Structures are given as structure tokens and as C-alpha cells.
Image: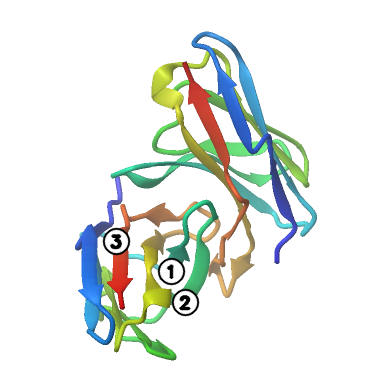
Amino acid sequence: TQLLEQSPQFLSIQEGENLTVYCNSSSVFSSLQWYRQEPGEGPVLLVTVVTGGEVKKLKRLTFQFGDARKDSSLHITAAQPGDTGLYLCAGGSQAGTALIFGKGTTLSVSS
Amino acid sequence: DAGITQSPRHKVTETGTPVTLRCHQTENHRYMYWYRQDPGHGLRLIHYSYGVKDTDKGEVSDGYSVSRSKTEDFLLTLESATSSQTSVYFCAISELRQGVTGELFFGEGSRLTVL
């Protein structure tokens, strides 16, 4: 059974601070996706990474896929209150199979 | 926004009663999924479908069944609801992109309470 361990589970920071969320597994994934979810809504995709070592930037968010495709990280620079939410990583293996989700990181950014 | 709707959005039922949740899409996506979301557990896969009448079990499939008779509809049935099935249920759809599972588009969720 493939598992994705996400850490930390909770993160409470001040506006302007930097943070990193980690997503780790002992399994190799063909792709890894990061989602953000707000209360009462479904998750929304932030990014997909498919190549080992790949780095993608989305404004203040930087996503990295590990060289061995077993882990990923999400780094937020100068966090803002609008970044508050639940961040989920999800790994895909064989084409067409369902994604496996980590348990999520709840981020709270206060002004 | 992807055309995906779930019904009902909220339901309260009693232990032992059958419950069916419906997911309807207008995107003609091949893959459809049912996840449940509980505090401390993230999203856990119940069942998924890779085509009409083609389904497979996920990690928490016990007590649930699914059916997909049309591309656009994916039904999740709890034959005899239990309190442990109180949860928020999300339907999602996707297609393959470059040989891997593409972006999941989620519905707004169905909150089920079993008393």
C-alpha cells in the first residue's frame, strides 16, 4: 500500500514568514500534485510535477519533486492571510489509477 | 469551473438505512472517483471508475458500492449506513495527461450524518 506522509500537520504563522510543507513516501510516484482546499469547498489543483528534480514556481509558491520521485515540498515565501487553507499532496502511480492523498497540512496565516 | 455536481449536498439519516449519493459531470471525463474526508485522515479513496461499468475498489471500500451506467453519472451507495460513515464525501473527475492521471476536478462535497 502506497502512503504519503505530510508534515507538519498544522502550521500557524505570522504574515510575512516563510514556510515549507513536506510530502514523503517510500514509494516512487509517476506524478505528484499539490492541492489547496478552503472550508466547505473541494480541493483545487495548484501544480503537477512529473520529472524527478523538477522545480515549479507559482508566484510566491515553489514546488519541488525529489530526484527519486518519492518526495516533494511546497515552499511559501512571505506568507499572506490569503494563503490560509488546507494543503494536500497527492501521488499518482500507474496511468489511470487513482491518486493517493496525504493527510494534509492546515496552514493559518495571521496578520 | 469543471461541470461536476453532487447531490444531495447535505443528508441526515439513521443507522441501517440505505443512502445513495450521486455525482454528475458534463465534461465527458473518463475517470470518476469517490473520496471521503475526515479530520486527521485527509482524503481517502472509496471507489473509482475508469469507464462505463468499469470500477475498482479503493482503500476504504468496505460498506460501499458504486455504479456507473453512463459516462456522466457515478453513484455511491451505502447499503446500510453506520455512524462510522458520517463524513464529507467528494466526487472527482479526471483524464489522463501525458500518460499520468491529470488534474482532479472536485465537486463541492456531500455532508452525510448517520445518527
Q: In the figure, is residue B21 to the left or right of B16?
A: right
Do labels 1 and 2 touch, CB within 8 Å?
yes
Front-lying residue, B59 or B99: B59
Alpha carbon separation for disc pair 3 and 1 = 14 Å
- Residue A25 shows in this picture: no
Secondary structure of residue under mark 2:
strand
Amino acid type at mark 2: Val
Q: Which mark is residue A105?
A: 3
- The residue to which callout 1 is attached is A33
Q: In the figure, is residue B18 to the left or right of A32?
A: right
Front-lying residue, B70 or B8: B8
Across and down, in percent, residue B84 comes to: 39, 23
Do labels 3 and 1 touch, CB within 8 Å?
no
Density class for disc 3 (Cα within 10 Å; few <14, some 14-19, many ≥20) is many
Secondary structure of residue under mark 1:
strand
Q: Residue at x 61, y 15 (%)?
A: B18
- The residue to which callout 2 is attached is A47
Across and down, in percent, residue A75 comes to: 28, 81
